[in-house]
Amino acid sequence: MNEKKVIVIGAGLGGLSAAISLRQAGYAVEIFEKNSQIGGKLNLLQAEGYTFDLGPSIFTLPHIFERLFTASGKRMSDYFTLRALRPHWRNFFEDGVTLDLYPEPDKMADEARKVGEPPENIERFLKYSADLYDLTNDGYFENGLDNWRAFAKHYGPWKFFQFDLFRSMHQGVASHLQTRYFRDIFDFFIKYVGSSAYRAPAFMNSLPTIQFRYDLWYVDGGLYNIARGLGRLLNELGIKVHLNAEVSEVRQEKNRVTGLVANGEFHAADIVVSNMEVIPAYEKLLRADKKFIAALEKKLEPACSGLVLDLGLDCQYPQLAHHNFFFSDHQKEHFKTVFEKHELPEDPTIYLVAASKTDSTVAPAGCDCLKILPHIPYINDAQPLTREDYLCFKDRIIDKLERMGLKDLRKHIVFEHVLTPLDIREKYNSYKGSIYGVVSDRWKNLAFKAPKQSSLYPNLFFVGGSVNPGGGMPMVVLCGQNVAKKVVAWDKS
Ligand SMILES: Cc1cc2nc3c(=O)[nH]c(=O)nc-3n(C[C@H](O)[C@H](O)[C@H](O)COP(=O)(O)OP(=O)(O)OC[C@H]3O[C@@H](n4cnc5c(N)ncnc54)[C@H](O)[C@@H]3O)c2cc1C
């Protein structure tokens, strides 16, 4: 066993994945987490008989999580249970049209015909998406490519052009699909990374493949059971987790980090992996100079934040599926308002999850529990919105849902909990309250995030949504696995 010690700052999914993968590679690993539980944004809220996934609720690409278990000779199914969902999503439009998404081509074709979208358009689009996914997966995902040089070396000049580099995601969608319904739906797959379909590069059209090829899953009892399962694995591997242990400083000597300070005590380490996002970590833990931070800020603009509204109801709405989207009537404007003007949208597209449709344990009998999540701008520190501003916006959301069929929703609320971007920043130390790390923007970063290894200290690594390949549960878990490979390769060199 390698005697070197790695300390991971933060027990989000990225940090947990890095810790497990590094332990499996033979390092002694400890984790320091500021909160009283592991999981980071993968979090839950239980109150008055209702259980809410406070963070993620859509589980995709389970095979990436499975690797954490198989590398220790275990099976993920012994730790938590998955269930494929049908339909994947239900989409509601202001004119009363409702469309479901299914991975089965015949069912998808029936939905397309309802609004005059030729089914072959959807097939062609999904083939285009699958080709982009395979291309992206082969290098950027699985080889953990971090910069242009590594990209050019892996892909060579010809494959480069297959990334559909000269169009936005929306242009890629619009060139395949003709109805506004399916254009809006497939544009909104950008929700997986909290960005704008009009600003993201066309290769983000790889996103539908994670759902149409690999399916969309629910974890029985709620998604926090993933964190509980990983917690068991940490124990079995002998990884010590220090809870309520906020790291306040990473110490440096010459060009190396030597360890960190938590709760006033110094802990030495040979290697440090930060699951705290890149900019706050350089700013607050390493006290990097202003010029260095300003250069990072230019490239690593945050993805959007969100208003997380959890509602316990005294009734059920039979028209809801497990996952639902209530579309803006002006989606282009919605994207522009959130991602370019950085204002609260007048008419947002709203994601609503009703886990009670699948899991009878998450709400009292005959009741629904709803998590509602409109994407909104990250915090503007120069002119921050107040909690009251966000609560006014919440009323706009309820008005829209009532207008679009959830009749008398307000009257049926018996429990309510609201997380604003200010709470999200406070809870997870996320940069400006972002929920997916760094934005994917063709003009700012071409969807590249920060590299996994620090450019200042070679024994400092980063993992999570602000690092390649970016936010979303499977991506940060993949990032943790790739960070471990990078650490091992660097350590051997
Ligand atoms: C409301 C919401 C809905 C989402 N929906 C989905 C979804 O449906 N599907 C999906 O795949 N993804 C979704 N996401 C995104 C997904 O949750 C994240 O991309 C992912 O969980 C982030 O993991 P991470 O490891 O990068 O960071 P985090 O989960 O933020 O973990 C970072 C950890 O580091 C800790 N930390 C920070 N600073 C310090 C410090 N100084 N000392 C000690 N500890 C520290 C934090 O407390 C935290 O535990 C959603 C996120 C949110 C918030």
Image (spheres, rainbow, N blue to C red):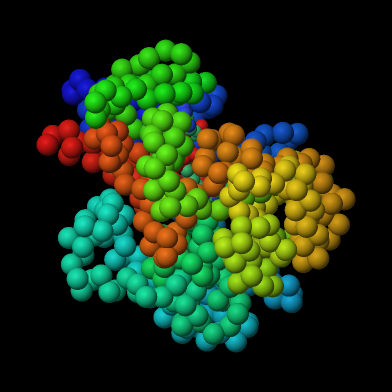
> Between residues 124 and 287, which one lies in front from this camera angle?
287
User: Picture coordinates of residue 238 (x, y %)?
Assistant: 34, 21
> Residue at 62% across / 46% down in the picture?
382
Left or right for 469, reference 46: left
User: Picture coordinates of residue 173 (x, y %)?
Assistant: 48, 76
Residue occupying the far top of the picture? 265
> Between residues 84 and 239, which one lies in front from this camera angle?
239
Quarter of the picture containing the C terminus is top left
User: Picture coordinates of residue 195 (x, y %)?
Assistant: 51, 60
Q: Is residue 126 above or below residue 441?
A: below
> Residue at 49% across / 74% down in the picture?
170
Residue 50, quarter of the rendered image: top right
Quarter of the picture containing the N terminus is top left
- Can I make out residue 110 in this image? no
User: Picture coordinates of residue 335 (x, y %)?
Assistant: 59, 65
Left or right for 398, reference 8: right
Left or right for 93, reference 271: right
Residue 489, quarter of the rendered image: top left
> Residue at 46% across / 82% down in the picture?
176
- Can I make out residue 166 in this image? yes
Left or right for 77, reference 370: left
> Between residues 123 and 73, which one lies in front from this camera angle?
123
Count of numbered labels shown in the rendering: 0
Q: Is residue 67 above or below residue 443?
A: above
> Residue at 66% across / 45% down in the picture?
384
